[in-house]
Image (cartoon, rainbow, N blue to C red):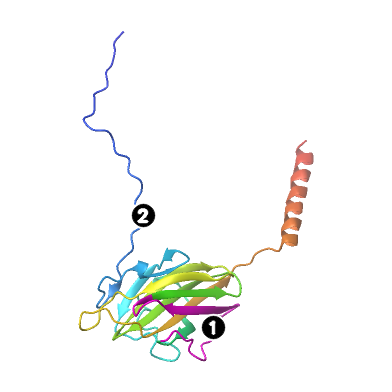
Amino acid sequence: MTSFRLPVLAAPFLFLAPAAAMAALCSGVSVGTSATSDVRLLGTDSSACVISTVMSPQQFGGNTSGFSSAFSGSGTGPWSLITGYDGNGNVLPGAPNVLPGVTFTSTLARTSSTMGTWSIAASAPVTLDLVFAMHGANRSGSFLFDDLSLPGANATGTWEIKWVNNGGNVPDYTNLKVFGRDAMVTTVPVPGAALLMLGGLAGLGLAWHRRSA
């Protein structure tokens, strides 16, 4: 009987676990170290970000021209203002807080001059594109959450400014606008309707079984 001997390997194979998704650097001007991980919601980094000289929060209704082209591939509808905050974290009066079929409530807090926390809640489960647009010095940073699924309950997150101003320094937070588009309310069947549907499926299965017997 012919025997075969496997060669001895000098070093064992190394099995590497897949690396966690890395945050992507923002595009635009004066980016500094800004990345998608600078703004998070529900434990997830933003999808994309851009730093612009356009002050997105500067107008009462917000100015979307600083990020609209950069985020053009994420949806089709126009951007609408959801809410806005001043330098002290107070909600700006007159913000609509409404997209078709859903009403939003939100909060913003600062833990330092360049970072803090935020939250947003919807009156019904909803999927939408959302932009968190901060103003600091002569720059604004816009962070996209593409196809974000919001539960009816409160969703919490964090934010941080890492872009730089004309002097090469990280600026303090000044104000904020939150925009949304393509909102679709997620319908959840009520328990009674779900039971009726299951009963109907069971009936169809029984009828098929009798026919095939």
The image shows residue 59, relative to residue 182, as above or below, that is below
Membership of 86 in magenta stretch: no
Specify start and end residues of the magenta stretch as a single range. Answer: 88-115
Q: Secondary structure at mark 1?
A: loop
At label 1, counting other C-alpha atoms closer than 10 Å, the crowd grade (few under 14, some 14-19, many 20 or more) is some
Q: Amino acid at mark 1?
A: Asn
Displayed quadrant of residue 23: bottom left
In this orientation, which residue lies closer to the viewer: 173 or 11?
A: 173
At label 2, counting other C-alpha atoms closer than 10 Å, the crowd grade (few under 14, some 14-19, many 20 or more) is few
Which residue is located at x 43 percent, y 64 percent? 44
Is 60 on the left-hand or right-hand side of 55? Answer: right
Percent across and percent down for residue 137 are 29, 86
Circle 1 residue: 97
In this orientation, which residue lies closer to the viewer: 115 or 186?
A: 115
Is residue 71 visible in this depiction of the protein? no
Q: Secondary structure at mark 2?
A: loop
Percent across and percent down for residue 101 are 60, 77
Percent across and percent down for residue 204 are 75, 48
Q: Amino acid at mark 2?
A: Ala
Displayed quadrant of residue 213: top right
Circle 2 residue: 20
